Amino acid sequence: MASFGWKRKIGEKVSKVTSQQFEAQAADEQGPVDNSEVDWLQEAKRKKGLLLEDCVAQSKHLKNEGAILAENGRYQEALHKWDEALQLTPEDAT
């Protein structure tokens, strides 16, 4: 019975020119990275700000959805929605 394997021999179907181009591009990409281009602290603050805004918006949406459910007499589901909203924004308990 013949054995089967996924591994190919290196360079079996890759031309030498293509291989050399790939190696040259990889060497260029591995050059030193200038960290002064990106202000990581500012980026982290911006992402955190966006996450907080998303939480506030989703909390407001869940509160409105809970109010609609309560008006329709579905109190258990309304309490669940309000609880989710409180978990997102615990400082806003209105």
Image (tube, helix red, strand yellow):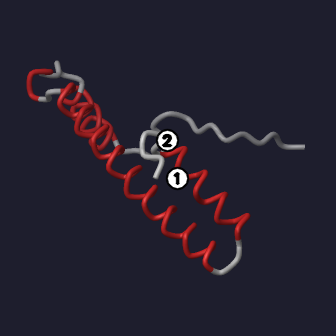
Residue 24 locus on image (x, y percent): 22, 31
On the rendered structure, is 84 left or right of 45? Answer: right
Q: How many marks?
A: 2
Whether residue 69 is situated above or below residue 16 in the rendered picture? below
Q: Nearer the viewer, residue 82 or 48?
A: 82
* Residue in the image at 45% along x and 64% along y: 61
Residue 55 locus on image (x, y percent): 41, 49
Image quadrant where one finds the N terminus: top right
Q: Residue furthest top?
A: 32
Residue assigned mark 2: 12
Q: Amino acid at mark 2?
A: Glu
Instruction: Examine the image and state in which quarter residue 15 appears.
Output: top left
**Sooner in the amino-acid sequence: mark 1 or mark 2:** 2
* Residue in the image at 57% along x and 67% along y: 66
* Residue in the image at 42% along x and 60% along y: 60
On the rendered structure, is 81 left or right of 62? Answer: right
* Distance from Cα at disc 1 to Cα at disc 2: 58 Å
On the rendered structure, is 17 left or right of 69? Answer: left
* Mark number, residue 85: 1
- Tell me if mark 2 has few (under 14), some (14-19) or many (20+) residues whose alpha carbon lies within 10 angstroms of its own: few
Query: Which SS class for mark 1?
Result: helix
Mark 1, mark 2: which one is toward the viewer? 1
Instruction: Examine the image and state in which quarter residue 48 appears.
Output: top left
Whether residue 63 is situated above or below residue 29 in the rendered picture? below
- Tell me if mark 1 has few (under 14), some (14-19) or many (20+) residues whose alpha carbon lies within 10 angstroms of its own: many
Query: Which SS class for mark 2?
Result: loop
Q: Nearer the viewer, residue 28 or 58?
A: 58
* Residue in the image at 21% along x and 25% along y: 41
Residue 82 locus on image (x, y percent): 58, 57
Residue 6 locus on image (x, y percent): 67, 41
* Mark number, residue 9: none
